[in-house]
Image (tube, helix red, strand yellow):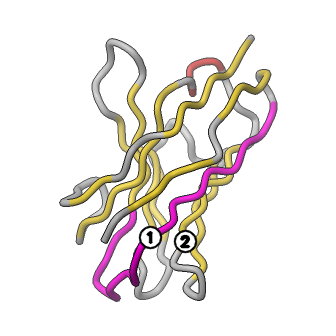
Amino acid sequence: VQLQASGGGLVQAGGSLRLSCAASGRFYSSTVVNWFRQAPGKEREFVAAIRWSNFRTYYSDSVKGRFTISGDKAKNTVYLQMNNLKPEDTAVYYCAVGINPGEYTTRGQGTLVTVSS
């Protein structure tokens, strides 16, 4: 499956963005779709994940309560709603699929999110 992330942009602190991750094919029921991010000079960070079989969700502590991951089975698309954005959320965000949260075998290209103070 190929993944296409979109929705990034420039936003002021406190603002919101919604990222989308569209798959070229169907996600298997065993699939976990993850969002990761990587800021310049920093290591990759797990952000959130959703298990495609039952839509169970997982979040890192840094985004819990501010970000919401969701899925649309009809569109084979996963969304990341990001609210109350902070400058430290600035990063390239990319989606990736695997079978466990925080792990992946295939990733898409990233979309840049920039949060100004």
Residue at the disc numbered 1 = 23
Which amino acid, mark 1?
Answer: Ala
Give me the residue at 43% from left, 51% from top: 35
Label 1 SS: strand
Classify residue 24 as left or right of residue 55. Answer: left
At x 72%, y 15%, the residue is: 116
What's drawn in magenta, residue-wise?
15-33
Q: Position of residue 74 (x, y in %)?
A: 59, 88
Q: Does the residue at mark 1 contact the one at mark 2 (Cβ under 8 Å)? A: yes
Q: Can you identify the residue that label 2 sits on?
A: 77
- Label tally: 2
Tell whether position 26 is magenta.
Answer: yes
Secondary structure beneath dot 2 equals: strand
Where is the C terminus found, in terms of image quarters? top right
Q: Position of residue 92 (x, y in %)?
A: 46, 31
Task: Indicate the amino acid at tag 2.
Answer: Thr
Above or below residue 112? Residue 54 is below
Q: Residues within 10 Å of mark 1 (few under 14, many from 20)?
A: some
Q: CA distance from mark 1 to mark 2?
A: 6 Å
